[in-house]
Image (tube, helix red, strand yellow):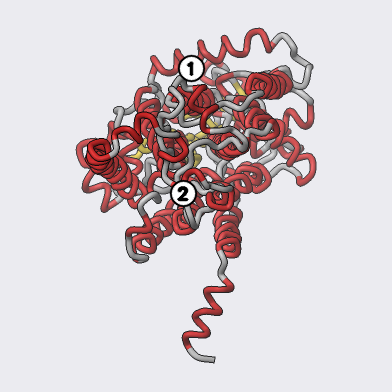
């Protein structure tokens, strides 16, 4: 067989569908491999402990401090089948994160992305450092991202088909998403605003039964939320107060700015971890708006010339004959990703005159030609900019919130990718993979802002000491993550003591092998001496490093804050003191 024949056979084997399956398998590998490599984050330990408590004691009540109930119920379900561990705690986020790349397929099938754009977007979803890192992480944000994409695909199908089932899927996505975290309303609001724009501008006509569809969507969403927030009916009174407590709590957090930063802090994170996606998105936005202006000028010039030559045809002629031929003969097959064409209305069976009548335009006046790809690009740009503006304003600046800005940015970044040679996405992927391997697979503490109160690997030494002890006292205020790691029978050896400085006699007479306390308490107990000080958790603060951001970008040697444990042992014990 000739080289040309081999090349043709190779290309024939790697269809888009097979390529997407390979990308998904790579995505799954990056998220499941060594999933328990690092200790659970501070928040992960709390989420895991509450999930285990829900499983073993059946206790759960919504508290906005710890976000929505969905995470706890699904994690408890995993624990019931596979047992409780670091790996199983992170399993559902890893699986959901792995599937994100698959959502480009229905978008491609509907004709909103071509094959090249969809492939590159899938690759970016699979290897993005932030998406991989926080898919290996038990927090609500990856759940919200997953349900956001469910809503996106369902909404696109509803716009195309106008079927009730797609509205119900969107409603389920909203209900589950709202049961995950309190920032889901931002997504719903952004989507709703753009839908209103499509309706108001006449680019989409509502289906005949849209009121029924909307009512069913709301019922599904509210019903799902009611089930979870009432703890499956165990705490029905929570339905009356959960929304109020959530608003009050997060307004207070916004004002407090306990983990604050400047409005542009997420742009710095994009530059650190997602630089190729960020730059490609900027280029796409530039091309979209500048190209649009150029196109409008050309259309205006062309229209003026036609009006001068055929004024009567435009003002009095039939609308269908005035529109381009390819628009009036559009079929569903023409809307595939490989052959995008302009479309006037997405609802099958709706006539042009009906659309004009719904828009209040006189019969015989030509309708605006709607290019579905252009409108999808417009939506994603709006989604990205609105999300970035919202999270720039919100006082709580934590690294996982970048995900909700990154998802629309990935779509925006690929809109003009086909104009580049193959080396651009290849180089982009190399950068992303190297950065992803660094932040997700380094088996040690990393000097990176992507971590926020991450539990230090030094705690493994402390756990070895606890395992070798018969009785341990732990400062109640600093019980995480110890409370999670010693939740079972092994945990009976651990006592959590409040106000240690006021309970010296209890500690002295408690026959403890170890006393573990926050180092800033300078605890002194007769008969005990400090064995060592270990880093409990650490973080990277913008304010501690703002004067040397450029050197840090290349050297990764920033100042890291930490919270530490003092470990006290009996005087003259078998432990070797420092």
Q: Which mark is residue 228?
A: none
- In depth, the one of 400 and 527 nearer the eye is 400
* SS at badge 1: helix
Residue 246: x and y, percent? 55, 15
Q: Residue at x 46, y 49 (%)?
A: 326
Q: Is residue 394 visible?
A: yes
Instruction: Check disc 2: other Cα within 10 Å, few if <14, some if 14-19, many if 20+.
Output: few
Residue located farthest toward the bottom when viewing the structure as drawn: 1
Of the residues tagged 1 and 2, which is closer to the observer? 2
Specify the quadrant of the image occupied by residue 152: top right
Residue 53: x and y, percent? 73, 29
Specify the quadrant of the image occupied by residue 493: top right
Residue 393: x and y, percent? 35, 23
Residue 114: x and y, percent? 47, 54
Q: Which mark is residue 250?
A: 1
Q: Residue at x 41, y 48 (%)?
A: 446
Q: Quadrant of the C terminus?
A: top left
- Against 275, residue 397 (above or below) is above
Tag 1 and tag 2, C-beta contact below 8 Å: no
Q: Which residue position holds label 2?
A: 326
- In depth, the one of 44 and 402 nearer the eye is 402
Instruction: Check disc 1: other Cα within 10 Å, few if <14, some if 14-19, many if 20+.
Output: some
Q: Is residue 550 left or right of residue 391?
A: left
Q: Quadrant of the N terminus?
A: bottom right
Q: Is residue 290 visible?
A: no
Q: Is residue 545 left or right of residue 526?
A: left
- In depth, the one of 119 and 84 nearer the eye is 119
Q: Residue at x 53, y 26 (%)?
A: 188
Which of marks 2 and 1 precedes in the sequence?
A: 1
């Amino acid at each position: 067989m000739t080289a040309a024949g081999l090349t043709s056979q190779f290309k024939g084997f790697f269809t888009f569908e097979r390529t997407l399956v390979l990308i998904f398998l790579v995505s799954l590998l990056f998220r499941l491999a060594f999933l328990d490599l690092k200790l659970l984050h501070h928040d992960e330990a709390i989420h895991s402990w509450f999930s285990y408590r829900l499983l073993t004691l059946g206790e759960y009540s919504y508290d906005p401090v710890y976000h929505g109930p969905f995470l706890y119920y699904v994690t408890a379900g995993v624990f019931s089948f596979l047992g409780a561990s670091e790996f199983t705690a992170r399993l559902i986020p890893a699986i959901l994160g792995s599937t994100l790349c698959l959502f480009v397929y229905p978008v491609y099938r509907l004709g909103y992305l071509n094959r090249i754009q969809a492939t590159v977007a899938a690759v970016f979803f699979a290897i993005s450092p932030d998406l991989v890192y926080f898919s290996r992480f038990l927090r609500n944000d990856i759940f919200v991202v997953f349900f956001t994409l469910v809503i996106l695909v369902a909404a696109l199908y509803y716009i195309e088909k106008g079927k009730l089932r797609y509205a119900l899927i969107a409603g389920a996505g909203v209900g589950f998403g709202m049961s995950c975290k309190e920032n889901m309303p931002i997504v719903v609001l952004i989507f709703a605003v753009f839908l209103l724009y499509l309706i108001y501008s006449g680019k989409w006509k509502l289906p005949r039964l849209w009121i029924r569809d909307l009512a069913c969507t709301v019922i599904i969403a509210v019903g799902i939320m009611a089930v979870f927030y009432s703890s499956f009916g165990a705490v029905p009174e929570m339905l009356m107060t959960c929304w109020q407590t959530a608003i009050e709590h997060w307004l207070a957090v916004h004002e407090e700015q306990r983990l604050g930063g400047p409005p542009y802090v997420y742009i710095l994170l994009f530059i650190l971890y997602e630089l190729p996606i960020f730059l490609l998105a900027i280029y796409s936005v530039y091309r979209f708006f500048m190209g649009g202006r150029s196109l409008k000028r050309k259309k205006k010039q062309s229209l003026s010339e036609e009006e001068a030559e055929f004024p009567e045809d435009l003002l009095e002629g039939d609308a269908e004959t005035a529109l381009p031929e390819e628009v009036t003969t559009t079929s569903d097959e023409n809307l595939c990703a490989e052959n995008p064409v302009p479309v006037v209305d997405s609802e099958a069976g709706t006539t042009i005159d009906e659309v004009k009548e719904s828009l209040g335009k006189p019969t015989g006046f030509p309708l605006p030609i709607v290019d579905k790809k252009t409108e999808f690009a417009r939506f994603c740009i709006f989604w990205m900019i609105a999300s970035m503006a919202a999270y720039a304003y919100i006082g709580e600046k934590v690294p996982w919130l970048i995900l909700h800005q990154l998802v629309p940015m990935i779509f925006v970044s690929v809109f003009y990718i086909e104009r580049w040679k193959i080396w651009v996405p290849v180089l982009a992927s190399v950068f992303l993979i190297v950065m992803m391997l660094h932040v997700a697979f380094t088996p040690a503490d990393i000097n990176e802002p992507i971590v926020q109160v991450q539990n230090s690997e030094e705690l493994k030494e402390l756990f070895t000491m606890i395992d070798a002890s018969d009785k341990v006292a732990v400062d109640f205020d600093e019980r995480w993550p110890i409370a999670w790691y010693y939740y079972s029978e092994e945990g009976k050896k651990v006592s959590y003591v409040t106000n240690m400085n006021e309970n010296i006699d209890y500690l002295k007479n408690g026959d403890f092998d170890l006393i573990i306390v926050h180092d800033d308490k300078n605890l002194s107990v007769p008969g005990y001496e400090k064995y060592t000080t270990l880093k409990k958790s650490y973080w990277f603060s913008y304010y501690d490093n703002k004067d040397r951001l450029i050197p840090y970008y290349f050297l990764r040697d920033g100042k890291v804050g930490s919270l530490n444990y003092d470990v006290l042992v009996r005087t003259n014990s078998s432990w070797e003191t420092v």
